Amino acid sequence: MPSRTDSASRIAVIVFSTQDRNLLFGTATPVGLDNYRTLFTGDALFWQVMQNTLYFSLLLVPLNIVVALGLALVLARPFRGAHLFRLIYFAPVVTAAAAWAIVWRFILQGENGTLNQFLRLAGIDGPNWLHDPFWAMQAVIATRVLKNVGLNIVVLLGAILNIPAQYEEAARVDGASNWRDFWNIKLPLPAPAPLLLRVITLIGSVQVFGHILLLTSGGPGQSTTGVVYYIYYQAFQFFQTGYASALAVVLFVVTVSYTHLRAHETVLDLVCRLLLEKKKCKIPNTYF
């Protein structure tokens, strides 16, 4: 339950968004909705930032869940070294975000970076990962997935292991292949868990800040600048806290709207599963 301090902070941000506030000089002049008009009609960089954020989220969320689901299916069956493997994939989750980004910045340096040195041994001339607009975004996405995928693996593994054993036993008796077992049992039955992970992962991808700050500083150019980094840039580089507050309000509205939409679809799906035959339900894509 939100505290009074949280509620007061949200109200303050909304009020600030209707002012021309300068953090450096401490001035505040009411301007109504001018910040929002500038945001949508006069700030071309805002739309580039939104495009960057959308691209980042559309790649990161499915990739994170696909990798997590694949590894969770592997770990659902006992094998030698499983405990060591679980330690390895979960270690990045508990690693400090700043340390993780700084280490990867050294690994992904130009010619002297560790990754390019290994590629050179294989006869491959690697790109300048963090100084090429295309590869910089791919590097941010890949390192972010590696950082957080361990938590998603734990959640999906728990959901898979909680599937009642009689379903798989019945499938084996009916002669179902491994593919049919996966498609009809392991994929749909843990559905609430992937929905939770998708919402959490998407919110995290939209709010990513420290990772970008330490890895690329939003560059090259503004190719990896996300919404939260842009809010920081407006507030603490240009000292325009009123405009930054308007950006924060827009981000809040978009995030809450998406979460509400997904929750609404889930409720409809559960009602459909209970009252109608499964084949008549328009089941939403709970994974992506």
Image (cartoon, helix red, strand yellow):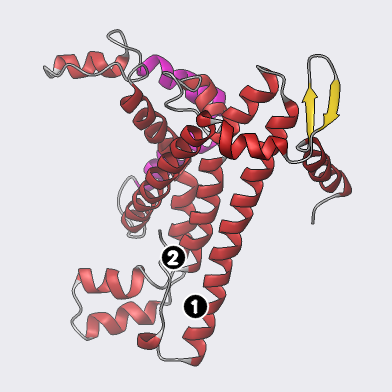
Q: Is residue 27 left or right of residue 73?
A: right
In the rendered view, tell whether residue 154 sits above or below residue 13. below
In the rendered image, residue 77, in percent from the top left (x then y), is placed at 32, 60
**To which residue does mark 1 refer?**
269
Structural crowding at the residue carrying mark 2, measured as other residues with C-alpha within 10 Å and reported as few (<14), some (14–19) or many (≥20): many
Going by the numbered disc 1, the residue's amino acid type is Asp
Give the main secondary structure of the magenta stretch: helix
Magenta residues, as a range? 82-108
Quarter of the image with the C terminus is bottom left
Judge by depth and name the residue closer to the eye, 32 or 112: 32
In the rendered view, tell whether residue 200 sits above or below residue 100. below
Disc number for residue 4: none
Q: Is residue 171 left or right of residue 277?
A: left
In the rendered image, residue 206, in percent from the top left (x then y), is placed at 54, 42
Question: Which image quarter: residue 122?
Answer: top left
Judge by depth and name the residue closer to the eye, 98 or 15: 15
Determine whether the residue tagged by mark 2 lies in a helix, strand or loop.
loop
Judge by depth and name the residue closer to the eye, 248 or 152: 248
Of mark 2 and mark 1, the one earlier in the sequence is 1
Going by the numbered disc 2, the residue's amino acid type is Thr
In the rendered image, residue 60, in percent from the top left (x then y), is placed at 41, 43
In the rendered view, tell whether residue 160 sits above or below residue 101. below
For the residues labelled 2 and 1, the Cα–Cα distance comes to 10 Å
Q: Residue at x 47, y 51 (%)?
A: 152
Question: Which image quarter: residue 130?
Answer: top left
Q: Is residue 96 magenta?
A: yes
Q: Residue at x 37, y 34 (%)?
A: 142
Q: Are marks 2 and 1 in contact (CB under 8 Å)?
A: yes
Q: Residue at x 42, y 39 (%)?
A: 56
Disc number for residue 286: 2
